[in-house]
Image (cartoon, rainbow, N blue to C red):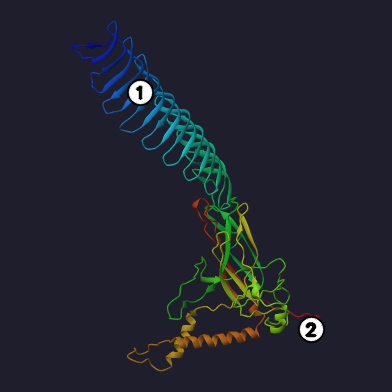
Amino acid sequence: MATVVTNTTAKAIGSYVGETKKQIRDGFGVYNYPNKFFRYEGEWREGKKHGHGRLIMADGSFYEGSFENGEITGHGYRAWVHTKNSYTGQFERGEQCGVGVMVYGNGDKYEGGWQNNKREGEGELNEANGNIYKGSFYQHKKHGRGYQLYSNGDQYEGEWVRGMKQGHGTMKYNDGTIYDGQWRDDTFNGQGSIVHISGVLYEGIWIAGRPAVEAFTLALDGSNVIEIEQGKPFNIEIFCHTVDGEITQDDGRLLQITAGVKVSNKRFSIDGKQNEQDIISTPFDFDAEPYPLTEIPADCEPSLNGRLEPPSPIIENDDRTSEQDRPGPDDQAKTRTSPPPTAGGHMTSSRPDSVHLASSTDGEGISEVITSSSQGFLFPIVPAIRTVNGRATFENTFLPACSRSYSTTFEDREVLDGRTSQGQKSKRGSKKGSVQHSATDLAELKEGRRRKDKKDEKNNDDKARFCKPGDYVIIVKDVTSPPFLGTTLQPAYCHVKVNAKQKRAKSKIDKR
């Protein structure tokens, strides 16, 4: 039978409505605490909460589950109104202890071991942002060995210390990059190796996420000035250097080589404005503009008469006819559109020597390449190569002849000014001594030069097969993509002085 017990002493002890035994709460009853914040509904034994019960807080939070000797102990469910967290699992003396599931108000969920209201032992944490961790916890943090799957696809498996990757572990990034080695404070630190998505390989000591011996710039082997003779191929050997000039052991950096020719004077466009397009700044005492650079294949070497002897000619046509649209053998016999061989046995092109810009999507990070044709032969561009132990060598590079039409130079303007200043004065209020240049004058000047160049080319056929004597620059760039660890090495420059080809003295046998 239910009995109401009321204490009216000076120190209030709350009110109880429920079953009693020998004036002691025993059985089922409801107890309102004197501070009015707690209310208990449930089973009692010998005056203490014992068995199944529900403890309700004034803010709406509550616990429902097992009680032992007045304490929240055993399996139960607790909900917090303010944080919207909820826990289902084991308790000990009012604290989460044992195995349980916590669903957080922010969307996170943890299932695993607990100790003193903190995650501890083996467990799985699913975060609202998509990260998933399976492994060991200590003091509410990832600690020990564990596996982390990040929302972007990155995966880490290894050791943790107080919530950070520390010790040995393997990280597989979503782009394919893999690091295996030592960690400290979530960064590469100690002995480790990386296979980067760009193709770069590095194995060695890491300090705070960077290689202990880190490349900073590309450098030439020896002097950065070389002299060669017209028509002679040459080699360029490159090293990866640190800031202090130490050679690194970088494997797989992608290097691209290009060339430029010295620009002595300022260049001007047709409208007379200075044209700075394609100007290359060099560390030497001159600027340059792009110039084609090729390589001589193993089966294509310069012969004694200075001509290049490739295995087969490639004829360039303006209409760029495809293979299936080209005339067959019978049609060729009728039309004879192919140019005849020259005296030296070489095929001549249907167009003059030229420089072409061709788009490339499979050049390992190179979006634009330069090809050069000389006397009807299409020379290959110099392909990008990768470093091995911090070294790379471009072999048999070659500066071919090029008849590219450059913009009007400063000298052209002087000639034009001298010619027009002797003509009639400008009309309609032009100032005395001023000169106006028309597009017709420039066209006539270019036409005259073109005719002269054509005549010189005809008279100096051998000379036209090689680049002109002068100053050239070779540029080697790091085109690794994406950049290794976000860093692109500084380029290397080589000043190439091309000397005129020496005529071979005739021997007595030749004279006969």
Q: Amino acid at mark 1?
A: Glu
> In the image, which disc is placed on residue 64?
1
Q: Position of residue 92 (x, y in %)?
A: 40, 20
Residue 484 located left or right of residue 509:
left
Residue, x 52% and y 46% (percent of image)? 173
Q: Residues within 10 Å of mark 2 (few under 14, many from 20)?
A: few
Q: Position of residue 239 (x, y in %)?
A: 59, 56
> In the image, which disc is placed on residue 47?
none
Q: Is residue 105 above or below residue 279?
A: above
Q: Is residue 64 above or below residue 17?
A: below
**Residue nearer the viewer, 495 or 417:** 417
Q: Residue furthest top?
A: 22
Q: Is residue 363 above or below residue 173?
A: below
Residue 209 located left or right of residue 380:
left
Q: Amino acid at mark 2?
A: Lys
Q: Secondary structure at mark 2?
A: helix
Q: Earlier in the sequence, mark 2 or mark 1?
A: 1
Q: Secondary structure at mark 1?
A: strand
Residue, x 46% and y 81% (percent of image)? 270
Report which quarter residue 80 is drawn in: top left
> Would residue 59 be seen by someone viewing this image from the given angle?
yes
The residue singled out by tag 2 in the image is 511
